[in-house]
Image (cartoon, rainbow, N blue to C red):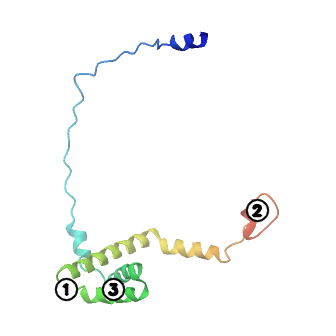
């Protein structure tokens, strides 16, 4: 009975108050920005290189169907690059995407980074352990 009474007598004794929102919110103006100029970069990449088209279409074919489809789509992309219509446009779009990815990889030196990472896996520099006197590949295990 005493336990029941202590549970029923508990009430919240905090008083919650609310503050009014200011009636004059700050006014923010939208400043228009000039439209980007796409004419210079579009003319450079309108006709991507044969290598970009072959690599892009071949990679898409490899992902979908393996080496035979990679060869087929690469050669088909090379044939379709000068055609008008959806096949030619899609082939040129894949070539532009591949060329942009190649430029980005060259700017970031990704090929060099990948080459040095693979080289470090197969006989890279041997490191000396800071915690003990062991040397070699297993120096960083503890």
- On screen, residue 16 above or below 51: above
Residue pointed to by mark 1: 83
Alpha-carbon span between mark 2 and mark 1:
61 Å
Q: In the displayed structure, does residue 130 sit left or right of residue 94?
A: right
Mark 1 packing: few (<14 Cα in 10 Å), some, or many (20+)? few
Query: Relative to residue 134, is residue 122 depicted above or below?
Result: below
Decide which of tag 2 and tag 1 comes sooner along the chain: 1
Q: Which residue is mark 2?
A: 129
Identify which residue, 55 or 49, lies in the foreground: 55
Badge 3: residue crowd in 10 Å (few <14, some 14–19, many ≥20) = many
Q: Tell me the mark number nearer the camera, choosing from 1 and 3.
A: 3
**Viewer-side residue, 40 vs 8:** 8
Tags 2 and 1 touching, CB below 8 Å: no
Q: Which x, y percent locates residue 36?
A: 22, 59
Residue 67: image tag? none
User: At 24% from the left edge and 27% from the top edge, which residue is drawn?
Assistant: 25
Q: Secondary structure at mark 2?
A: loop
Q: Quadrant of residue 81?
A: bottom left
Q: Residue furthest right?
A: 133
- What is the quadrant of residue 19 in the picture? top left
Q: How far is mark 3 from mark 2, CA to CA? A: 50 Å
Place of residue 96 in the rendered image (x, y in percent of width and height, measured from the top left): 30, 75
Classify 10 Å Cα crowding around label 2: few (below 14), some (14-19), many (20 and above): some
Q: Secondary structure at mark 3?
A: helix
Q: Residue at x 40, y 89 (%)?
A: 68
- The relative height of residue 61 versus residue 27 in the rendered view (above or below) is below
Of marks 3 and 2, which one's residue comes earlier in the chain?
A: 3
Q: Which residue is mark 3?
A: 73
């Amino acid at each position: 009975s005493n336990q029941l009474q202590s549970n029923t007598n508990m009430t919240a004794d905090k008083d919650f108050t609310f503050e009014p929102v200011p009636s004059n919110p700050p006014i923010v103006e939208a400043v228009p920005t000039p439209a980007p100029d796409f004419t210079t970069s579009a003319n450079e990449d309108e006709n991507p290189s044969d290598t970009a088209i072959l690599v892009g279409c071949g990679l898409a074919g490899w992902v979908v169907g393996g080496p035979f489809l990679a060869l087929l789509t690469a050669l088909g992309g090379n044939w379709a690059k000068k055609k008008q219509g959806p096949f030619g446009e899609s082939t040129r779009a894949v070539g532009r995407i591949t060329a942009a990815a190649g430029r980005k990889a060259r700017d970031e030196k990704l090929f060099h980074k990948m080459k040095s990472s693979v080289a470090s896996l197969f006989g890279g520099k041997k490191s000396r352990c800071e915690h003990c006197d062991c040397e070699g590949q297993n120096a960083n295990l503890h």
